Amino acid sequence: EVQLVESGGGLVQPGGSLRLSCAVSGFTFRSYWMNWVRQTPGKGLEWVARIKQDGSGKDYVDSVKGRFTISRDNANNSLSLQMDSLRAEDTAVYYCAKEGSLGYWGQGTLVTVSA
Amino acid sequence: DVVMTQSPLSLPVSLGQPASISCRSSQNLVSSDGNTYLSWFQQRPGQSPRRLIYKVSNRDSGVPDRFSGSGSGTDFTLKISRVEAEDVGVYYCMQAARLPLTFGGGTKVEI
């Protein structure tokens, strides 16, 4: 059974940092692109970043470029999102999702950026 | 960015009746490899999104055959042949043909 479990969310002040993790099981992690997607009540679903199978390719939505870094550890079946210089508008539920067309999603982790 | 426009915003339906959701993209979604990367997702209340359809018309494993996807180019449709109570939720289309991946605003299906 495919499972993706996010962790690391919480309350952080504007300008602060947070690192999200996603532990996966039930599929050959190193064979798939992986993504981060976020959801807010106001803006709906927004794709954030993706990373190639071997980590050699990374893409980001413009609003997080230079602030967020996606990475993966294929030996430990885990995906990460380092979020720096956080802003109020980054407040959202963050999901990790498997493969290019987001075939499987985790349950999400809530990130709140507020003073 | 490719803008995905869904209609209607809200869709009241009766049990056992058909339902249809439209999704239009601001650009053609045929990728350089010849595939059309248009997917549909269902998000039930309190749950994560779940993919139902990928590449326009391919149902994911475990998705009931009352769900079907169709369309081409810039116009796409998700149909539910006979709505059941468990189909209540918000439905999103998404394109993965061009970066950034983008979603429609969602259609709320309610009984």
Image (cartoon, coloured by chain):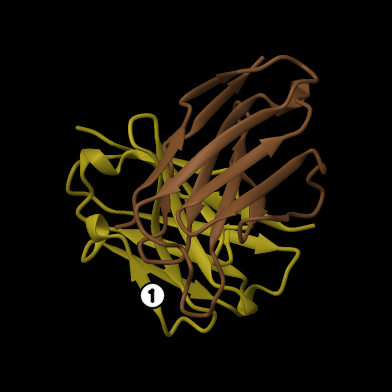
Chain colours: A yellow, B brown
Image side of residue A103 versus residue A58, left or right: right
**Image quadrant for the N terminus of chain A?**
bottom right
**Image quadrant for the C terminus of chain A?**
top left
Task: Give me the residue at 53% from left, 63% from top.
Answer: B37
Determine the image quadrant of residue B49: top right
State the residue in front, A113 or B26. B26
Q: Amino acid at mark 1?
A: Lys
Image side of residue A12 versus residue B15, left or right: left
User: Residue B69, how many percent across, how many down?
Assistant: 66, 48
The chain letter under disc 1 is A
Q: How many marks?
A: 1
Determine the image quadrant of residue A60: bottom left
The residue under label 1 is: A58
Task: Give me the residue at 64% from left, 62% from top.
Answer: A24
Give above or below for A24 relative to A31.
above
| Mark 1 residue crowding within 10 angstroms, few (<14) / some (14–19) / many (20+) | some
Image side of residue B16 versus residue B102, left or right: right
Image side of residue B101 versus residue B70, left or right: left
User: Residue B48, how many percent across, how many down?
Assistant: 59, 40
Determine the image quadrant of residue B57: bottom right
State the residue in front, B69 or A3. B69
User: Residue A32, how many percent across, how many down?
Assistant: 60, 74
User: Residue A66, how many percent across, how many down?
Assistant: 21, 66
Give above or below for B53 relative to B96.
above
Give above or below for A103 relative to B62.
below
Give above or below for B5 relative to B84.
below
Task: Give me the residue at 45% from left, 52% from top.
Answer: A37
State the residue in front, B49 or B76. B76
Q: Secondary structure at mark 1?
A: strand
State the residue in front, B67 or A32. B67
